[in-house]
Structure formats: C-alpha cells, structure tokens
Image (tube, rainbow, N blue to C red):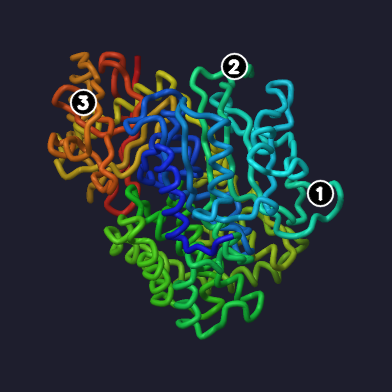
Amino acid sequence: MKKLTSEELRNKYIEFFKDKGHKQIASASVIPENDPTVLFTTAGMHPLVPYLLGEKHPQGNRLTDFQKCVRTGDIDEVGDNSHCTFFEMLGNWSLGDYFKQEMIPWSYEFLTSEKYLGIDKSQIAVTVFAGNENSPRDTESAKIWEECGIAKEDIYYLPDNWWGPAGTTGPCGPDSEMFIKVKEKCCEACNPSCDCGAFLEIWNDVFMAYNKTADGKFEPLAQRNVDTGMGLERTLCVLNGKKSVYDTDLFEDALKKLEEVTGLTYGSDAGVTKAFRVILDHTRTAVFMIGDQKGIVPSNIDQGYILRRLLRRAIRYARQVNLNDEGLLEIAKTFIQKYENVYPELQQNREKIITEIAKEHQKFSRTLEAGLREFEKVVKKLDGNTIDGTTAFHLFETFGFPIEITQELAKERNLNVDEQGFKDAFAKHQQLSRAGSEQKFACGLADNQEATTNLHTATHLLHAALKKVISPDINQKGSNITAERLRFDFNLPRPCTMEELAEVEQMVNDVIKQNIPVVMQEKSCEQAKQENFIGLFDNKYGETVKTYSIGEFSKEICGGPHAKQTGDLGTFKIVKEQSSGAGVRRIKAILEK
C-alpha cells in the first residue's frame, strides 16, 4: 500500500470521484444548521440531510467532499491510540443515481489500484448485512465484492451492517464496511466485529433503500441513495503503518512544538504520552470550533459548554507537563498553519481563536490550583468512596471544574461521583443539566415537519428585520430550531431594547400578513453575491447555490426547507432576548396559529 500525506489522501479521494462524474462541494460548518438533534456535525452526511430526503442539490446528484466533524461521546477516551474529538470524513454521495453495482467496484478500485491507495486485495476484508425481518440478507453486495476480487472467506455477513435512522424516522438501509487485516485472527470464529484488533475499519458504503415510518414500518424509498464515509485520520494510520493517529503528519508539527516548549519527549513514558495526546486533540478541536464559519466561544451551555470542557481538560493536562498559556497558544498557532490552506476560515479567524483560548486559559488557571487543593481536601474527608453531588457542584461553581474533570480526578483515585446529585444541584441554578446535553449527541436525520419548516422560514424574516431595525451589520452567528421554537444568534455588543424588539416583531408579522411567496432559485455564488443575497462567500469551488427570496424583504442563501408563502407561518412572537457570549445576542421566538 502507498504511504501518503494527509494532503495527498484528500486530493486522491476527491480526484477519483471527480473522474466518476462527481462535483466537489465544500465542507459545511462544524455547527449544524437548524438541527436540534445534535450539537455538532458528526458525519459527512449531516449537512446533506435535505437532499437525502429528496430535495434537489444545486450541484447535481453525484457529490464528493471532505467534511469537518466533531464527536464528543468519547472525550474521556482521548489519549489512547485512536480516539479524536475532531476528525475529517472523506465522502461521496449518490442522490437517487448509482447504487451497489457502481459503488462497490469503485470502492475496490480506489482501495487496490496502484494509482490510488494500492492496498493488496488479500489484506482487505468486507462485511455485508446478514438480514432480518425488515430487509433480506445482502447477497447482492457479497456477490459484487466477490466479482471484484475479494476472496469469499474475507466476506462476512453481520447483523450490525445496517445504518440508521438514529431518530425515529428517516432513510436507512444496509451497509458494507471495509477493513484492513492488521494482525492474525484471535481464533477460528474471529471476524471484523471481534474486539481483538485483527481488523481495522477504514470505509463504509451505506445503501439507503428504505424509509422508516413513524409506525415502525420500513418502506422502499422512491429515491435510493449511497452515502459513504472514509475517516482521514484512521486511513492515514493504515497507509503509513502507524499505530496511532497522533503519529501521522496531521499532528507532526504540533507535536514537535509541544516537545520544544515543554522540554519533554513524546513516548518517554505513559503519563507524558497521554498528556501530549489530550493537549493536541483538544487544542485542535478548539481551533476548529472557534475558527469555524459559525465559530463559537466557551460558555456554560450547548456547544460552548463542550468547548469549555475540552479547553479546561487540555489546560489540566498542560499543567502536568509545565505548559503555560503561551505554550498552549503556540500549539494552536501550529494547527492553524497546518490546516489554513484546506480550511481558510482558520486563518481568517486566527485572532479570535488565539484570543478565546488565551482568555479561557487565564480564567481557568486562576482557580485550577485552588480547585485541585480543594479536591484533595474532599478526598481526605471522604467517608466511603463516593463524592456527593453537592460537593461536585461546589467544585464546578467555585473553581470552574466541569463535572467530567471531577469524575476523571475521582477515577484516578478509584472513587465515584454522584452524577445525579450534581445534576440536581445544577438544575437548581437554572443551568443546563448534563443529561439534557447528552440527549443532543444522538445523531439522526432531522424531520422536515411543517412546524420546523415554518420556524426556519421565520428565521429569515427575523434576520432581515434585525438588519433593518437595529443595524445592517448584524449577521447570523448560529441557529437552532425545534418543532416548538426557533433560536437565533447574532452579533451585537449590547442588549436589544424593548422598543427594538417590539419593532422587529411587528415588522416580521407585517410580512407574514402580506402572504408573500417564498421563491427558490439556483444561482452561481458570484451572481448571488452581486444580487445582495446574504450568505458565506468563501466557497473556493465556485458552486451553484440555492437562494430564497421573500419579496425584497429577505434574500438569503440556504439549503431549506421553507414554507411556500409567509401566510403559512401564523403569528410571530419573541419570547426571550439574552446574551449568548461575548458580543453575541440570542433571540428565542415562537409561531402561534
């Protein structure tokens, strides 16, 4: 197999699928657009949900990209060989076009051709769906793999080869996963589902053939899709014979800088290795969260809470290796430099990234040492092996320790933490409970319900009204929509006045009463820019985009979904206006019928 750099792997993947008639699309934001089910973009398919559900994509029905992703379910595992909170996913999609007969041979070609990855076919194992009461055994995929050249004994039927939906409804279907054999099987019955480490997954082809209905039925989809994903970091490990993602070129420069500023050597002992990996991973993720098109800042709610948790965990481990504020910022700068040609927004937001990391480091460092001393006092006074929830909350409220840091410190001493007691104490102070945050990590396809569609359209009207009433410099900094309400974040260094909010609300309702059609048109980025549509014009691929006009009142680039006319919305009502971070305000609003 070929040894490739991260840049070479990205380029080879994209060029391969361009040669197969795919259009390259830019990576979407790591902050999901109007999806209340997740805090972050967790997979390459996430930004394409509307098109997987049937909307027409302006670039056609064959797409490819590399997508920024964040998954936070395994933060405590970061420090081992493979876990990362930020990662890149290489992907390609068929939106009602090709299916198994094309995708499986293409997968085989990309993996084995000397022009691309050059992996010996004898090193490849694949899995296909074993079948159940909802869908038959996927003998079709197995046959195609065998025809390509994969040995019959290297094709495994497994019951878990089924994708989605993670929610209650939506497209789903069997998948076929590709593995590299990295060592001898542990026993005769060993297969890719075994946890012995003999097989390492690098690619997954999902064949969306069904739609799961609200009553649990699986109906054939009118538009069958293909959705694939190849993890960049993991594939680099395999191709270059590395045991850890931290040994790839993605971390090389930052790792050298970390050794330089600490005077320690990576791999010298287990403690240093784990500390270095946590610092590298969490700092890289923070750089992408803050430097994103919809960049966030540390806070005590939603995405900002996760960012704060990552930075404070990195700062705790930085203290163990004598890495100070300036040292951590040097690591951040190294990551900006490593990725800025691939993701230009990092260079554009460089000052913000550095400023926010420095602020959080200074804020937490002031109380970290005192908090650690307080924790030791708690341990000494402990009667039993469990730290009660009230004490855990005291560490959070007084010393800024997220519950996860207290749990991690406790685990190092074979102690437990009363998490429910912490949640109860947290709830009393009207802050986001950990349980509420965890519910948002379940990935799934968002429903295109009428209520969410109308609220999405209302965000366009709200955005336009804020520009007209308060300042034309106001821009969206984030949004979140459920079936009950909309939440809209925007830049403003002060609170809105009651008079301004009343005028914004009235202006939106006036447009709703006029029952203006919502018109979608496909335009080039340049044309949309010339016609004063609101949107991010940093797309270096010159794509066609979808534009939505509501008369002359609102003109935005957006992926939908939208109401057909404003009269469908009902009465718009602002229920709350508050701070969402430094220089960012948040409006929550509802629609009443």
Q: How would you rate the neighbour count of disc 1 (Cα within 10 Å): few for under 14, some for 14-19, many for 20 or more?
A: some
Label 2 SS: strand
Q: Residue 219, labelled with which disc?
A: 2
Cα separation between marks 2 and 1: 34 Å
Image-quadrant location for residue 452: top left
Q: Give the residue displayed 37% in from the left and 56% down from the top.
A: 290
Cα separation between marks 3 and 2: 35 Å
Q: Nearer the viewer, residue 426 or 162?
A: 162
**Type of amino acid under label 1:** Cys
Q: Residue 190, labelled with which disc?
A: 1
Determine whether, in the image, residue 221 is placed left or right of residue 139: left
**Type of amino acid under label 2:** Glu
Q: Give the residue displayed 66% in from the left and 28% down from the top.
A: 140
Q: Which residue is mark 3?
A: 549
Q: Nearer the viewer, mark 3 or mark 2?
A: 2
Q: Quadrant of the C terminus?
A: top left
Image-quadrant location for residue 499: top left
Determine whether, in the image, residue 324 is placed left or right of residue 165: left
Residue 151 x/y as whole percent: 73, 44
Label 1 SS: loop
**Type of amino acid under label 3:** Ser
Residue 270 x/y as whole percent: 66, 75
Mark toward the start of the polypeptide (3 vs 2):
2
